[in-house]
Amino acid sequence: MPYKERMRDTALAEIESCYALGWTDGLPVVPPTPERVEAMLGEWAPRRAEAIATLLPSGGVATVEKIAANAVMAGCLPAYLPVVIGAVQAVAQPAFGLEAVLTTVHSCSPMLLVSGPVAAELEMNAGTGALGPGNRANATIGRALLLVMRNVAGAVPGGLDPATLGQPGKYSFCYTEQTADSPWEPFQVTKGFGAEESAVTVYGADAPLCIAEMGRPDPESILATIVESALIPGSYNAFFREDLFLVMSPNHAEVIGAAGWSRADVQQYFYEHARLPAGHLRQRGLYGFAEVPDYANVVMEADAETLVPVIASPERLCLTVAGGAYGGYTAIVFGMGSSVTLPLPAA
Amino acid sequence: MNVQAESFVSPVADAFQPGEPAARPESLDDARVGLVDCMLNPSGNWGQGILDGAEAAIHDRWPGAAFGRVPRPQVVAEPTETWAPAMAKQYQALIIAAGD
């Protein structure tokens, strides 16, 4: 057999072995050979055995080496490893509720927002198609995190991941902000970090719902369309009333920012207007099924006509800016629980 | 052509952090056993059915055991750090039914 053909057969056999071992998300992976994992570890190699986190639901220990092996499989470059490690640290924070995000029958999955200078250093795409395919860093960093969820946290579909439907974001959901075209400070600044600090934010996200408002380029019209599109009584937000992400296109952000609206103004507007009648909510979605959390008692106890906000407080709206220059779109990312932001770790 | 798993660095966790096991009493006779319903949907009574079975099995083996039913919401529950010590003051054993 000619050399090239033999090599091709070997490469395909390695990939098939990874399938047979149950390590993949259904897409082919780069087989994690010792040489590739060593290259991925780089300056992290002395810390390879260090436990970065213990991940529920399985209680698997995510060592630096395990994370690196998953990063290799995802197709990451070694420069991406600190971001993946930071993301693993973030999902392990109790406030994130990883065991709930991974073991619910709902379709949410860890979404990753990369903020700060590291995004440009890794040549992440914040522009056209920011939430879509085509950029290696966006695609593989998000995939690496979710392979860790499978292989270390045990979130195997049909196993500890019992999601009824799942969603495409369970393969990869990672993006970064278009800070150059944003009228507001970078997202990590709202979480107490500096504009020149790099950070990772994780969120138990549903698939993004992309909505258009292009006929009325004024802040009130854009925000009204966003608000009305967020009034979905079957969303988990309508029940838990926790964090909700907006990924606003630069076009929408520019119109709103140019009119003098701060990020806090947008959050307050959303909080005041994104409301559903309590009586309607009580007849929809999770109401009547799940135990109502204390903070949702307002829905159970209020008069039927009382308007209840879909986020419990203004700061629950996580406003980010990304996407191409043309087109007035905003993606609403419903989800479950609280987001967590951590600084990028150093080797 | 097969490639052996040993050719790779396994991405799968090979260590799991064990929880600290609680002390196991020799007998549950004279013990008070808490039966905790921690289902996401308690109104479905699936958790109560599971706990009924547990209660019957324990009663058969240790007729002197006493039982108490404990509701525990799965969503935004009291933190385990404060809930568990409070339970320990009332019960010598807990059986928790949990599901989505």
Image: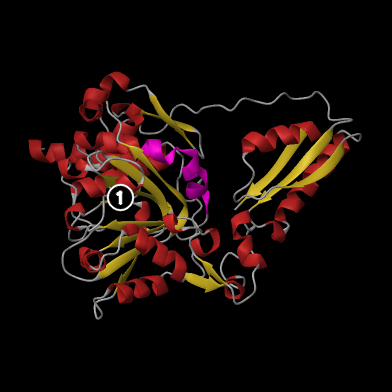
User: Which residue corresponds to the image point at 32% horizontal and 23% vertical from the top-left?
Assistant: A48
- In the current view of this chain or complex, which residue is farthest to the right? B64
User: Is residue A5 shown above or below A177?
Assistant: above
Residue under numbered circle 1: A187
- Depth check, front residue: A299 or A108: A299
Q: Residues within 10 Å of mark 1 (few under 14, many from 20)?
A: many
**Residue A216 image position (x, y, % from top left):** 26, 80
**Residue A88 image position (x, y, % from top left):** 38, 37
Q: Look at the image and tell me in which quarter the N terminus of chain B lies.
A: top left
- Depth check, front residue: A143 or B7: A143
Quarter where residue A283 is shown:
bottom right
**Residue B74 image position (x, y, % from top left):** 62, 49
Range drawn in magenta: A88-104
- Depth check, front residue: B75 or A179: A179
How many numbered circles are shown?
1
User: Is residue A153 shown above or below A63?
Assistant: below
Left or right: where does residue A161 sit relative to residue B51? left
User: Which residue corresponds to the image point at 65% horizontal and 66% vertical from the top-left?
Assistant: A300
User: Which residue corresponds to the image point at 59% horizontal and 28% vertical from the top-left?
Assistant: B19
**Residue type pointed to by label 1:** Phe
User: Is residue A300 shown above or below A141?
Assistant: below
Q: Chain of mark 1?
A: A
In reply to whether residue B54 is colored magenta, the answer given is no
- In the current view of this chain or complex, which residue is farthest to the front? A260
**Residue A164 image position (x, y, % from top left):** 50, 59
Q: Is residue A98 visible?
A: no
Quarter where residue A264 is shown:
bottom left
